[in-house]
Amino acid sequence: MSKNQGRLSSIKAVLFDMDGLVIDSERIFYQGYQAASGPFGFEDPLLLATVSLGVRDEETVLLFDSIMGRAFDSVGLVRFVDQYVEDYFNTHPSPLKPGLVELLAFLQHRGIRIGMATGSVMQRAEHHLASAGIRDYFEVIISCEMVSQSKPAPEIFLTCADKLGCAPENCLALEDSLSGVMAAYYSGIKVIMVPDLIQPDEHTKGRAFAIADDLHEVLALLKNEGM
């Protein structure tokens, strides 16, 4: 675990990302891009999977256009991967990231409010949380349809903090993606990164309060910080 200066004793709310942080779903998205690489004719599924993390579909299409060119079927690829992931989770339970339930129970016991700021649509978020049996932990869920800009814009975190009635400086965000870390940083919210598909670069490390290997480490850090 790496850690920057600062304390967490003033934290009153923790804001969770979903994919890759709460639900172990990013590997399924990656499998979708792997499955699409043949029919759509591209060679680096990991690149396309990682740049789309935390970004809603309309903006993912624009990102793919800029990377692959306007002749590439970006809309078709996004639809293919969305359908692949939907089909998978229609027949499989939503797997939780290790240490999540212990962390949620700790926060609830300490009276820390719990929210979610996810780049997924509300229907998908509700499905995953209900399927995993953890929906009742989350007081507020802000999904991509509820904001005008995706991460790394700060809007989704600021909206979640506002709905919880907490000032940004009294919130902590938990994120696995580079864009999510930057969104929290731009919002004035301390953020702990728990990398999933991609490791943080030096720029991201400088914006995070800490980098943790998993949610067990996050829980240990919060206890050490006196939360």
Image (spheres, grey):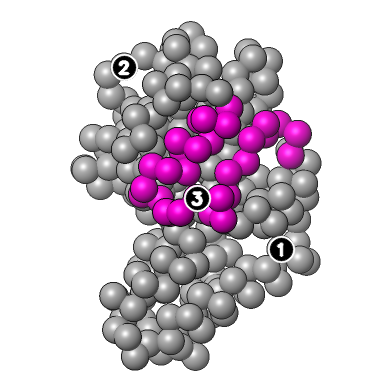
Upstream in sequence: badge 3 or badge 1: 1
| Image marks 3 and 1: residues in contact by CB distance under 8 Å | no
Which residue is nearer to you in this view: 207 or 93? 207
Within the magenta stretch, is there residue 161?
A: yes
Tell me what residue is drawn at x 77 percent, y 46 percent. 130
Label located before the other in sequence (2 or 1): 2
Q: Nearer the viewer, residue 198 or 67?
A: 67
Label 2 crowd bin: few (<14), some (14–19), many (20+), radius 10 Å: few
Residue 51 is situated, as x and y percent measured from the top left of the image, at 37, 63
> What amino acid is at disc 3?
Val
Q: Which quadrant holds residue 73?
A: bottom left
On the image, the x and y values in percent for residue 60 come to 42, 68
Q: Give the Cα separation between the discs numbered 2 and 3.
A: 29 Å
Q: Is residue 100 left or right of residue 171?
A: right
Residue position marked by numbered label 1 in the rendering: 89
Q: CA distance from mark 3 to mark 1?
A: 25 Å
Residue 36, image x, y percentages: 51, 82
Q: Which residue is mark 3?
A: 147
